[in-house]
Image (cartoon, coloured by chain):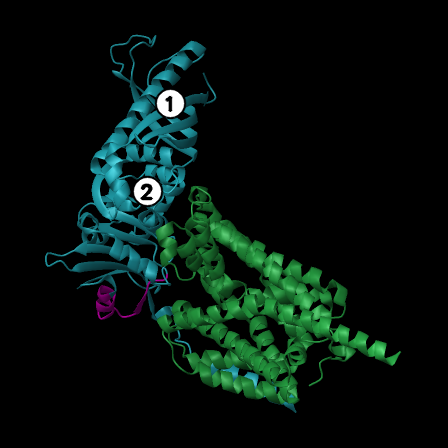
Amino acid sequence: MRKQMNKLLIAMLVITLSGCAEQKTLEKMGLLTTVGYDLTDDKQILATMVLLQIDPEAAQSSLILSAKSATSKGARNEADLKSPKKLQSGQLRVALFSEEVVQAGLINLADTLARDPSISDLTYLAVVEGSTNKLLNQKNEQFSDISQLIYKELDQNIKGEKIPSSTLQEVLHDFYAPGIDPILPTLKSDGGIVKITGMALIKKDKMVGKINAKEAFYLKLINDRYQAGAIELEIDNEGFDLLESPEAPVKLAVVLDTIHSKSDMNLLSKENLNFELKVKLQSRLLEINQALDLKNPEYLEQLEKKLEEKITSDIENLIKKARESGADPFGFGEIYRKSVRKANLTPEKWHSMYPESKVDVKIEFEVMRTGVVE
Amino acid sequence: MKVHIEPKPQNMVNTFLLIFVIHSMQVGVGIQGFQRIIYLEARHDAWISVILGGVATAIIGFIMVKTLSVYENSDLYGIQYDVLGKWLGNMINVLFVLYFLGGFHVIVRNYIEVIQAWVFPEVPTWLLSLTLVYLVYYGLNGGLRTVVGVSFFSVVLSLWLVMLLAYPIQFANWDYLFPIFEAKITEILRGAKQMTFTVIGFEIIYVIYPFLKEKDRVHRHMQYGLAFTTILYLAIMVVSLAYFSGGQLERTIWGTLSLFKIVRFPFIERFEYVAITFWVLLILPNLMLYMWAATRGISRIFNKKEQKISWILLTFIFLTLLYPLTRVQINMFNDYFAKGALYIVFVYPLLLFGAVLIKKKFSRKKDEANAQTNE
């Protein structure tokens, strides 16, 4: 008798409970894939949202909405009034911020993204040079969906080791860590396409400068490991025994790829804030724009030495540039915190110490092979 | 009340299964967010606090089994009745029943809070608690062996969740664990104290002991279960410390669930939803065993049938769950419960052990005196 009662109760629960949660029918949902934030003149937030269209008969595969409000979620509610479908942010892939927004302070907006459990921690964040609204509204014949274009471009370049990664988790991680500042890639609309121009330097949560794509490569060299990166470097051709030809370019350019790297940072002296940065690089020489006899190991060694010098001075310049802006995307502060007991480092304390720091850069560079010909 | 219990052979449980009972009782809602409360005390040395907490459970586990093994086949209720007398003993028995019910309430509250914060903000509390309470009633109907079976499957079926830690490890930066021992000893100890809410549950041995078959193997299996839990907590703590930065960890309410947030499969992009709903399986043995322990207590004190009591207790618990609480109030409730649990689980067993030893000594003397007068 009791068993039968239980069965009946289960059957009743299954029927009644399934209606209790809010239903989310895919056709009735507007899935946000990209959202962009601008500041308006009256200091409000202008949110531009790209919605994925599931309707196969729609002329365009995405729909763009924008709304103005004091908060980002308020703007979403505002945009709901303009939308035929209920807006959902579970499929959000990219969040864009205009330079103005990041200069005023990024953290409130980024924090809202993290507070919403439906937003993935792997959402990419990026800074747009100019207006995000214009960038998202631009027309392109080759791509019907701008959000897919931006997402795939960021994803491809981050996974392809062109630029450092900047997911929501990583940005918030670095923001809340005492000795490292977050970095975000910068995007620019360029005649129908979207180009990654470099990275934004951020002090605490405010943008203080920019570095270009090549400098972003060095930044990744310092922070991360490379498995298979690539870069083009230019060096003076002085001292090389080259075949003289009048049309040859003044500079000697080489392209390195399948770069393997490992970096190591240490604190040498805590009184003088003297750091040591060691980077070990191994790579393949893919292209060289002048005739250099690579069979001769002497030349190859000379080339390696020249490139080593070049990379060292580039990295030193990058560190100098970042230090002058006050941003520490390299995480020297974390090395300090790790090496000094009872450092009690806070972001404020580190930012006041950071301009006094010195870094000795040591690069070890090795050409592993020169392709299939010599 | 009879001090000694003679359970029917068909109600007895293999001692080997004690590993699963202990482990599944310890792992519940506490594990979802223990990183933050310990980090706030011991900073990045929090993992040392986790180890200390584990050591404390091992010591107390030893004391508990020793206390029980003084008696031939009895449980906490019988021992307290025997040692402390009818009135005081039964009063403390009732206190323990209330503690078990409190544990049940806290677990359901916290789990529903997680469900509402992460997955279904619109589903009402009464519905979720009714579902859980009914599931518990259903399990209790099968008796202790069913409940132990549930805890066995809860552990075995959820073991694969540990492997998902591989995802956050990819983002981990081990520098965050250094310098080791930066926190003061007092801070680390305070962190270990904060582990209370996360590690409790093993006090179930007090009630389940008479139903275990091989008494000589109880202690060994108890320690296996406790060690298993400590290793699991340590692994999660170390990964969390390396994955989150300090400030981030201070702000993350459910650290373990946030670790799952970056797990992404081609067919399930947001894995934490699966993990959270799967958590029912992890808290079910907690709920069932706590309710079973409370039911045993009442039925031992008043000599009544267990089935009817579990009905009454579950209805009572369900009614208390209807009272609405906010996140802040739930946190406060958790804190009070953890404070009470610290005394009940970590301090009281020592006192009880002392009392039992003294009682044993006296009764032996009395026996000897009796034997002498008889000669």
Using the rendered view, name the quadrant where residue A52 is placed.
Answer: bottom left
Task: Label 1: state its secondary structure.
Answer: strand
Which residue does the numbered mark 2 point to in the structure image?
A179
Mark 2, secondary structure of its residue: loop
Closer mark to the observer between disc 2 and disc 1: 2
The answer to whether residue A295 is above or below residue A177 is above
Write the residue at 26% across / 28% down: A317
Give the residue drawn at x 51%, y 83%: A13
Instruction: Identify which residue is drawn at 40% across, 67% down.
Output: B118
- Identify which residue, B151 or A358, lies in the foreground: A358
- Place residue A60 in its image quadrant: bottom left
Q: Which residue is mark 1?
A: A287
Classify mark 2: residues with Cα within 10 Å, few (<14), some (14-19) or many (20+): many
Q: Which chain is cyan?
A: A
Residue for point 58% across, 59% down: B229
For this orientation, the residue located farthest to the bottom is A1
Colour seen for chain B: green
Range of the magenta residues? A74-90
Place of residue A101 in the rendered image (x, y in percent of width and height, measured from the top left): 19, 52
